[in-house]
Amino acid sequence: MSPPKLIGNTPTLTLTIANSAIARKPAGSRERRLDDPFRDIEAFIRFASVWLAAEKVTVSQGDLARMVCWRDALFEILTAFINGTASSAALAVVNQEAERALSIRRISAELTIETAVCDSFVELLVGMCLDELEACDPTRLKRCLRRECGLFFYDKTRNRSARWHAEDPCGWRSRGERRNQDRPV
């Protein structure tokens, strides 16, 4: 029997990567924008530097293409999981990268797990996402119910009743839209 999953183990990197495929409407903006950290090599280097705390990150065009493919498959898997369906093609893509990520770990003489230096940061990011998903409670992964949003989030409420990824703006906007629909014309 595995130990119970704790509420606080939010898969932050995993959700950040999956949500990077969704166009968002920033506060004060009238139009939606896609702020994709994998749109070009410079954006990917900035993204990888933040998450990996690496001083010098080198990324090839192939790494970028692999990361975009992995992100799209992760997005599809999370969507399928939340909807209660299966996605075997996306699972194959994610697991192919997962096999590479698993091969970079080893145990030391002090019985600690070490991550070997590898040629690509894709394996490190994939490995970190796998660790997050293993440590979280997957039944708490949800999608924002506001039609215009749809971001993935991790429900930390005790009774698992969160409906929106954030109260501001989605909770406020959803309630306002509902009030306006109920109002007689």
Image (spheres, helix red, strand yellow):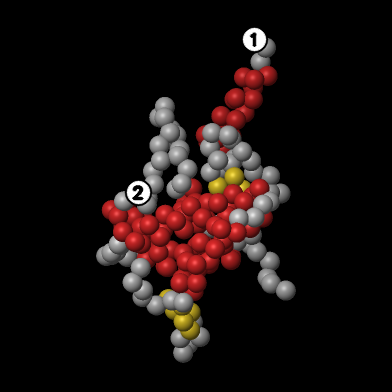
According to the picture, the residue beneath numbered tag 2 turns out to be 39
Is there any visible trace of residue 58 in the rendered image? yes
Q: Quadrant of the N terminus?
A: bottom right
* 151 relative to 92, above or below: above
Q: Nearer the viewer, residue 8 or 19?
A: 19
Secondary structure type for disc 2: loop
* 45 relative to 21, above or below: below
Please report the residue visible at 42 percent of the width from the left and 68 percent of the height from the top.
Answer: 123
The picture places residue 22, in percent across and down from the top left corner, at: 47, 43
Query: Is 118 left, or right, of 146 in this rendering?
Result: left
Q: Nearer the viewer, residue 66 or 109?
A: 66
Crowdedness near tag 1: few (<14), some (14–19) or many (≥20) residues, C-alpha within 10 Å: few
Q: In which quarter of the image is the C terminus?
A: top right
The picture places residue 13, in percent across and down from the top left corner, at: 47, 57
Q: Nearer the viewer, residue 74 or 139?
A: 74
Under mark 1, the amino acid is Val
- Which callout, 2 or 1, points to the residue nearer the camera? 2
Please report the residue visible at 46 percent of the width from the left and 71 percent of the height from the top.
Answer: 101
Give the label on residue 185, or none: 1
Under mark 2, the amino acid is Arg
The picture places residue 12, in percent across and down from the top left corner, at: 50, 55
Toward which corner of the image does residue 56 lie, by quadrant? bottom left
Q: Are marks 2 and 1 in contact (CB under 8 Å)?
A: no
Is there any visible trace of residue 28 in the rendered image? no
